Image (cartoon, grey):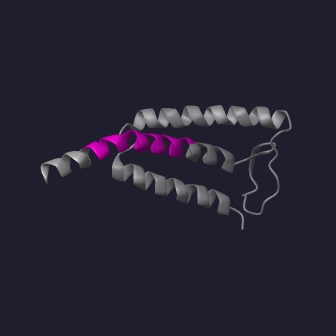
Amino acid sequence: MPGIYLTAILVSAAGIAALDARWRLAAWRSPGRTAAAIALGTAFFLAWDAVGIATGVFVKGDSPLLLGVDLAPELPIEEPFFLAFLCYLALVVWAAARRLPLLREDRRTLEETGA
C-alpha cells in the first residue's frame, strides 16, 4: 500500500511530539531553537544523501510502501520527513537524558524529607 512508510513516520513523530509536549523537552521548551536545529540537521543529511546518490552509494530501491513521488533521482519524498523525524527524535532523547540526573536528585530530596 503506497504511503504506509510516510504514515508510519508521521505517526511516530506525533508520538515523540506527545512526549515532548508532556515533558517540555525540546519544541515545547524552545520552539525556535528546535525548529532551527531540525532544519539544519535535515539540510545536512539531505546534502549527505545527495553525495551518496551522486557516488552511487545510495539507491532508492523498490518498495510498495513508498508513495512513488521522487524529489530527485533516487530521493523519495519520504526522505526529508524521515530525516526531520530523526533530528527531532535525537533532540528529544538528548533533552530527556539531560533531565534524568535532575529527576533523580528531586527523588532523593523527596525521600530525604519524607515527602
Farthest right residue in view = 56
Residue furthest front in the image: 112
Tell me which segment is drawn in magenta. 87-105
Give the quarter of the figure containing the C terminus: bottom left
Query: Position of 39 compared to 31: left or right?
Result: right
Q: Is residue 69 shown above or below 40?
A: below
What residue is rendered at 47% in x and 45% in y?
93
User: Is 97 placed above or below 63 here?
Assistant: above
Say how many tags the image has.
Answer: 0
Whether residue 19 can be seen here: yes
Tell which of 90 and 13 is nearer to you: 90
Taking 108 as reference, is 115 left or right?
left
Could you tell me which residue is drawn at 17 percent across and 48 percent down? 112
Q: Nearer the viewer, residue 57 or 8?
A: 57
Farthest residue, direction bottom: 1
Indicate yes or no whether the magenta region holds residue 62.
no
The x and y percentages for residue 22 are: 35, 53
Q: Based on the displayed image, in which of its 4 quarters is residue 50 positioned?
A: top right
Quadrant (top left, top right, bottom left, bottom right) of the N terminus: bottom right
Query: Would residue 26 be visible to someone looking at this image?
Result: no
Q: Residue at x 71, y 63 (%)?
A: 2
Q: Residue at x 73, y 58 (%)?
A: 66
State yes or no: residue 89 in magenta. yes
The image shows residue 83 at horizontal and vertical percentages of 62, 43
Q: Main secondary structure of the magenta part?
A: helix
